[in-house]
Image: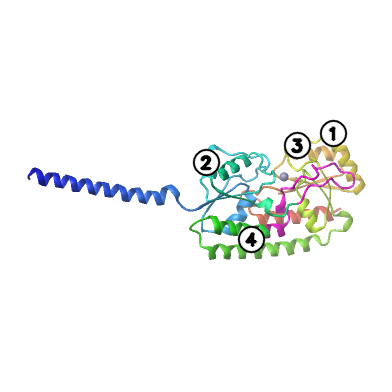
Amino acid sequence: MSARVRAARVRAALLTLVAFFVVAGTASGCAGGDERPRVVVTTNILGDITREIVGDEADVSVLMKPNADPHSFGLSAVQAAELENADLVVYNGLGLEENVLRHVEAARESGVATFAAGEAADPLTFHAGEEGGPDAGAGEPDPHFWTDPDRVRETVGLITDQVVEHVDGVREKAVRDNAEHYDGQLADLTTWMEKSFADIPEDRRALVTNHHVFGYLAERFGFRVIGAVIPSGTTLASPSSSDLRSLTRAMEKAEVRTVFADSSQPTRLAEVLRQEMGGEVDVVSLYSESLTEKGKGAGTYLEMMRANTSAMAEGLTGD
Ligand SMILES: [Zn+2]
C-alpha cells in the first residue's frame, strides 16, 4: 500500500468517525438534553389538576410530597434545578408555598414561563372570624382557592391555555380534550357537593378549622367561618392562650360542637381546644391542603373533595 493510499484511508476513517460523533451528538441532543417537554408543579393538588390537563402530552413533575404541608415544604437542590429547566412552572402563589416562591422567582428570572394559579383565581381576602372569633390576618389574600371547585374549573381553563402556549411539542387538541373531560368531572363534583350540603341546617353551618383554610368553600356553599385554632392563613403561626379563649367563646356563642382538623397536621391543638371546651367537641379530620398517596383517602383532587364533603356533612348533621 502506498503512502498516499494509506493517508487517504486514514482520512476516510477519520471522516467516518467525525460523522459518527456529529450524528451521535445530535441524537443525544434530542433524547438526552431536552428530553420530553416538562411541566413542573409546586403543590400536589395543583399537580393532580395539571396532570389531568396535560395527560400524556408532556412530563409533569410535582415538587410537594403526599401528606406534606404546602406552607412549609422545601426543595432539594435537584428539585430547584428542575424548576429552572421546566418549559412551564405552575404554582399556587399568594404566599402559600413560602419556602419555594424564591425558587419560582429565580426560574422566572432565568426565562422560564411561570403561572400562579391562585393569583389568577380571583382571590378572596381573609376576614376576621365571625361572632367574635380571632382575627385571621384580615385583608391578606387567601391562597386556599381550591376549596371552591368552581374556581378550580376556571383555573383549569387558564392552565390549559398556559400549557398550549408555553410547552412546545404538545398537541393542542389533545390537551383541550383532556381539559374538557376534566371540566365535566368538576361540574359533577360541584353539583354533588351542593346536594350533600343541602341537608345541613342553617344554624349548624358554622366552621372551625385548624387554620383558615375553608374560606372559599364557606363562601361558595353558604357556611360561616367562626374561627380557627391557629388564627392565621398559614400553619406556621401558633395561637396564644387568649386566641384559644376567644375562639372557645365564639364557639360557645355559635353552639359549634365540631372542629375540623387537617389530616397532615398534628391534632394536638384541636385536643387542647377539646379540653378547653370540657370535652364536648368532636374533632373531625379532613384533607384540606395536601393529597395523600394513591388509595389512602385523597389520592386525587376529586377524591379529596368528596371525602371532605362527606366528612363535613356528617360532622355537621350528627348529634
Ligand atoms: Zn393552609
Image coordinates for residue 202, horizontal then vertical, percent: 88, 58
Q: Looking at the image, is mark 1 or mark 4 nearer the viewer?
A: 4
Pointer 3: what residue?
Answer: 237
Q: Secondary structure at mark 3?
A: loop
Q: Is residue 69 above or below residue 299?
A: above
Distance from disc 4 to disc 3, alpha carbons, whole Å, reads 34 Å
Q: Is mark 3 within 8 Å of ligand 1?
A: no
Q: Secondary structure at mark 2?
A: helix
Q: Which amino acid, mark 1?
A: Ser
Image coordinates for residue 185, horizontal then vertical, percent: 66, 63
* Front-most of residues 271 and 22: 22
Pointer 1: what residue?
Answer: 241
Could you tell me which residue is drawn at 76 percent across and 45 percent down?
140
Which span of residues is magenta-colored? 124-153
Is tag 4's residue or tag 2's residue first in the polypeptide sequence? Answer: 2
Distance from disc 2 to disc 1, alpha carbons, whole Å, reads 43 Å
Pointer 2: what residue?
Answer: 81
Pointer 4: what residue?
Answer: 157
Image coordinates for residue 197, horizontal then vertical, percent: 80, 60
Q: Is residue 306 left or right of residue 1?
A: right
Is tag 2's residue or tag 1's residue first in the polypeptide sequence? Answer: 2
Q: Main secondary structure of the magenta part?
A: loop
The answer to whether the residue labelled 1 contacts the one labelled 4, judged by CB atoms less than 8 Å apart, is no
Q: Is residue 9 above or below residue 243?
A: below
Q: Is residue 137 above or below residue 217?
A: above
Q: Which amino acid, mark 3?
A: Ala
* Front-most of residues 41 and 307: 41
Q: Looking at the image, is mark 1 or mark 3 nearer the viewer?
A: 3
The quarter of the picture where residue 98 lies is top right
Q: Is residue 72 above or below residue 293?
A: above
Residue 140 part of the magenta segment: yes
Q: Residues within 10 Å of mark 2 (few under 14, many from 20)?
A: few
